[in-house]
Every structure is written in C-alpha cells, then in structure tokens.
Image (cartoon, grey):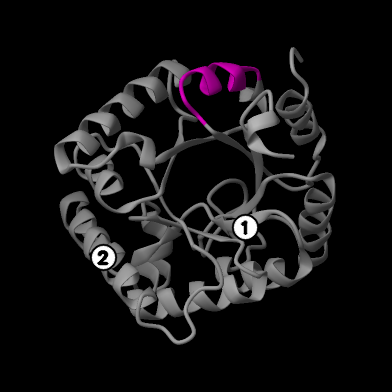
Amino acid sequence: MSQLHRAGPRVGVQLHPQHTDIGELRAAWRAADALGVDSIWTWDHFLPHTGDPAGRHFECWSLLSAMAVDTEHATLGSLVSCTAFRNPHVLADMARTVDQLSGGRLVLGLGAGWFEAEHTAYGLPFPGPAARMDAFAESVRTIKERLGRLNPGPAGELPLLIGGGGRKRTLELVAREADQWNWYGWASADPVAEFRELSGVLDGWCERVGRDPGAVARTVMVDPDQVPLVEGFAAAGAVEVVVSLPAPYDLTVVEKLMRLRDTPGA
C-alpha cells in the first residue's frame, strides 16, 4: 500500500535480541514480514541491558544477515548500531553486504553508544560524551565515504538513520549527514511534546547547514504501553513508528498500529 493512501505513519517493530533464542527470533521476523509491517529492526548490544545481565543475547549484524534472507518485503536495519564497536570501513562493508542479501532493503541506523558495561566487557574504550561524539561524527563520514567506493556498492539507496536526541551535537550531525532521524522517549514526561520540540530543533539545524528540513524523515520508537501516543507523534511529524518489542514476541500491538495505518478514521 502506498504511503499516499495510508491514514497513519509507517509501522515497524524492533525485536529485542535478548532473553530469547534464535528460533524464536526467526519466527518473529518472518511473522512480522508476513503481516505486512513496513520495517523490522534489532538493536546493537553485546549484553542484555534489562533483566538478567547473564541472560541470552545475540549480535546485531549476524542477525541482520539472517533477517535479510528470511524476509521479503519489509525494510530492515539496526536501531541503532554503535560505531564504536567496529572499524567504520568494515562496518560499511558489512552494511553493503547485508543490503545486497536483502535486495536493497537495509536502513543503516547508527549511534554513538551509551552502555558502558558492554564496552568494558569487550575491551572497548568508553571516553566521555564529547569524545564519543567526535568519534561518532568521524565514523559517520568515513562510512559514507567507504560506501561510495565499494565494488559492488549497495543494492539499494541504503538510507542512513541516526538515533538520539542531543540538541547540539547529535541533531546537527543528523542535519548534515542523515536521511532519517529516530528518537526514543522512554524516559520523557511528555514524549509527544519533546519529540515535537526536538524536531523543531532539527529544523533549525537543517536551515543553518543549508539543508531542506523535509529531506530528513522523522521517526520514533515506542514501547508497547506508549501505543496510545502514536496519533500524537504522527501529528507532530513522525512518518514511522517502531514498536520496541521484548520476547516473547506478541505482535498484537503491531497489528493494532497497522490497522490505524491502513484505515481512515480508525
């Protein structure tokens, strides 16, 4: 269904790769694709960050490779992939390969990283916020440059998404480099109002760097209990809403959003 004929924003699902097993994950992304969701995502962590810290957990890009060949319709991606975990040239090559496997359906979601425990556990540096943002900005530029040199290149357009809500460094980088922006307001007292405010800040950065604000698609991630806020997010400019879903993967809430997406007046 064309976005022009939809009543609501695109609908995606992020499948938490923790406290689950491979069979359950594969069944969930196949089921989501069969339902007709617009996008399927996973996160990029090495350790569980809720529940038992010694619980089961799986790596992002290995999962995305499997997702690319297990699904047929939805876009897929990392929401978001920490650039501190991998050499940016190698990450670009990985993303190109997954995009080829998927037939051009990958969205490359990137972030600066925040979970110190996994950096420590894997022997990765975890500098202060300013240094992390410096490194992140350099990695984004390096990834884009490397993608332009790979042979073959990506199979599709390979949109770049940046996640985060930092009003200065992050949103400036989004304005300069990204095709999509994602925000996750799980801790906000008024998520819709904050999303609207941050989207306005992004507009301002786009104007300052000489870019059309309409060139950056605004997306938001929500927890299942935040689904009643979706219409507010859409009114504030969100073109896609991604439900962050833990295992066991009950897609009922995603189906509800798809009805809102597809049914005028729902």
Give left or right: position of 226 versus 154: right
Residue drawn at x 49%, y 62% is 157
Residue 15 in sight in this render: no
Q: Position of residue 233 (x, y in %)?
A: 52, 22
Give left or right: position of 266 versus 124: right
Residue 263 in sight in this render: yes
Q: Which quadrant would the C terminus be assigned to in this image?
A: top right
Residue drawn at x 49%, y 77% is 94
Give left or right: position of 69 versus 223: right
The tag earlier along the polypeptide, 1 or 2, is 1
Q: Report the residue marked by disc 1.
A: 76
Q: Report the residue marked by disc 2.
A: 141
Under mark 1, the amino acid is: Leu
Q: Position of residue 252 (x, y in %)?
A: 82, 34
Q: Position of residue 167 (x, y in %)?
A: 24, 34
Q: Say which element carries label 2.
A: helix
Q: Are marks 1 and 2 in contact (CB under 8 Å)?
A: no
Residue 90's place in the image compared with 177, above or below, is below
Under mark 2, the amino acid is: Arg
